[in-house]
Amino acid sequence: MSAGWSSLEMAAAAAGDLVDGTYVNLGIGLPTLVTRALPSDREVVLHSENGILGAGPPPEAGDEDWDLIDAGKQPISLVPGGSYFSHADSFAMIRGGHLDVAILGAYQVSAAGDVANWHPGAGIPAVGGAMDLAVGARSVWVLMWHNDQDGRPKVLAECTLPVTGRGVVDRLYTDLGVFGFAGGSLVCRRLAPGVDRATVQDRTGTGIVFDDKEGQQ
């Protein structure tokens, strides 16, 4: 087995840290996997910016309802008690500070907790709702691969792509572990199975402070 987490294991790590009773927005891409990783007995209400509270996991193949999709246009389900509302109402929730956590995908995160979630030519037309979520949610988590397809670090001293929000990221989940931010530094809170400190430092574009309580799970 290769070292580090798979995409679903990364999502499970984030899902396991969510507190029951919280309202959580899932960004497009990897964050949508949290719907698969979140146990059905958890009381976490998932929000989709296109106007859904109570988003559930994707349906089985052949059971899709293409009138029921998430912000990334992928089919989802609705949990009992879920609701629909307008796009304007959805963003009123975001901008009004009514979401406890926003889990975003990203192209880059800096040691200061800056996040870059788009860039020209990436296939995403613009920054989208992430600019609202970055400042409207009470806590911002990022779920992304630690390195890009060419092996270059996505966790850097400073972002080189357009910054969506500065100093807004509270937690970062990658295939190599879980990270936090303190005093302008990246802090490793937990290493993924099979990943050692030397490996994660070698694959990161900034210095890392290792938490004394950091360990593998």
Image: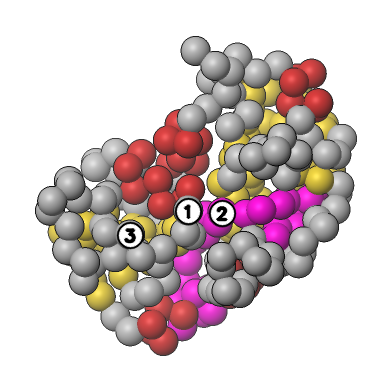
Is 114 contained in the magenta span?
Answer: yes
What mark, if any, has residue 105 been given in the picture? 2
Foreground residue among 119 and 82: 119
The relative height of residue 193 versus residue 78 in the rendered view (above or below) is above
Q: Are marks 2 and 3 in contact (CB under 8 Å)?
A: no
**Tag 1 residue:** 29
Task: Look at the image and tell me whether residue 13 can be seen.
Answer: no
Residue 24 picture quarter: bottom left
Q: Position of residue 20 (x, y in %)?
A: 37, 48
Q: Nearer the viewer, residue 177 or 203?
A: 203
Could you say which disc has been placed on residue 74 in the image? 3
Residue 217, given in percent of the width and then of the height, sits at 53, 20
Indicate the secondary structure of the residue bearing disc 1: loop
In percent of the image, x 48 and y 36: which residue is there?
7
Let me know if residue 24 is in the magenta part. Answer: no
Residues tagged 2 and 1 counted as in contact (Cβ below 8 A): yes
Relative placement, left or right, of 202 versus 16 is: right
